[in-house]
Amino acid sequence: MQTELTVQLVGLVERSTLALEQIAQALAAQVTAVQRPQEYELPLKEYPTFDWSSVGATVKQSDNNGPMLLECRGLLWVRRCKPQCNKSIWFSREIAEGEVKSSQTLITFKDIEPEALPDNIANVLQASCVNGQASIASSTAMGTYRQQLKEATCERQVDDAVATLQSSPEWPTLLETPALVAQLQAHEREVRKHICQQQSSGFLTLVTVRAQIDVELVRLRWDATTGTRYLQATYGKKSRRQLTDEELLNFLVYLKGQPTPGVEPAS
């Protein structure tokens, strides 16, 4: 009887220790998110009219050329540029850790010059648009879809955008161009990933990510063998414990994008 009680107590201590470690990791992730805001990068031409509230910043001081001093998450960010280079402006702050000094950048505006596509890639893209009627017929639905994704702040809104597109009269015609459908699906995955990353910097902790992965695995009816096979093929790792934080988020986004077995997608 005493041996059985001892085994139960040891198991309880191990589970409690694991839970405390997960809580500590989650708190550390939140502290890091607060201390190190996401760094943004935008074209230089957007600097004069940029909406600073979109990155959680408030303008504290300006001159004739625009904002000079920002406040973001309780920290002050100073406008900087190099006199010998007039193609970039950035806002940063100095960080002093003991005797070591460094800087952290909040946002950068620079002169971005897109590169022309090589002929081999351009030919592939042109071949994917052979059916011009599909592009024309679906232009209205696709425009609405892209706008909804652009404005989406949660996954439910992404789901609504997908449902609206798939229920549109143009959807059957759009399906005649698989390359275009694949492009839309890739864009959807990127939006979902971005939303997850944005949420992870606030309330979505690593503990929640792992819990949501468990929920998705049950929904998809994945067993341990299926999960291990996917992790090895995608990340070269056998266990979720070996994944980095970014890989965990990518894995969650992938699972959420998979259809529920036995449930027909909207048509």
Image (cartoon, rainbow, N blue to C red):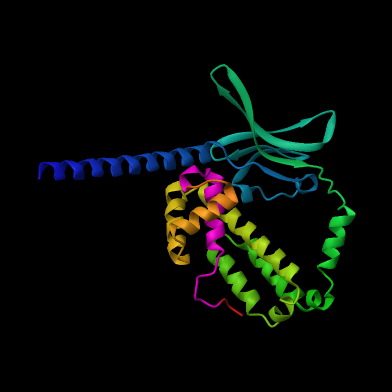
Q: Give the range drawn in magenta.
A: 240-264
What x and y, as percent, mark residue 217?
Answer: 46, 61
Residue sitting at x 63%, y 80%: 167
Residue sitting at x 67%, y 61%: 186
Question: Which is more toward the observer, 12 or 190?
Answer: 12
Q: Can residue 7 be seen in this view?
A: yes
Q: Quadrant of the C terminus?
A: bottom right
Specify the quadrant of the image occupied by residue 176.
bottom right
Residue sitting at x 54%, y 51%: 231
What x and y, as percent, mark residue 28?
Answer: 45, 38
What x and y, as percent, mark residue 21?
Answer: 37, 39
Position above or below: 79 against 232: above
Residue sitting at x 90%, y 55%: 119
Prevailing secondary structure class for the magenta stretch in the rendered image: helix
Question: Which is more toward the observer, 31 or 243?
Answer: 243
Specify the quadrant of the image occupied by residue 151.
bottom right
With 202 as the anchor, is 119 left or right in this view? Answer: right
With 138 as the anchor, is 194 left or right in this view? Answer: left
Q: Residue furthest left?
A: 1
Q: Quadrant of the N terminus?
A: top left
With 125 as the anchor, is 17 left or right in this view? Answer: left
What x and y, as percent, mark residue 85?
Answer: 84, 32
Position above or below: 115 against 105: below
Q: Which residue lies furthest to the top in this view?
A: 99
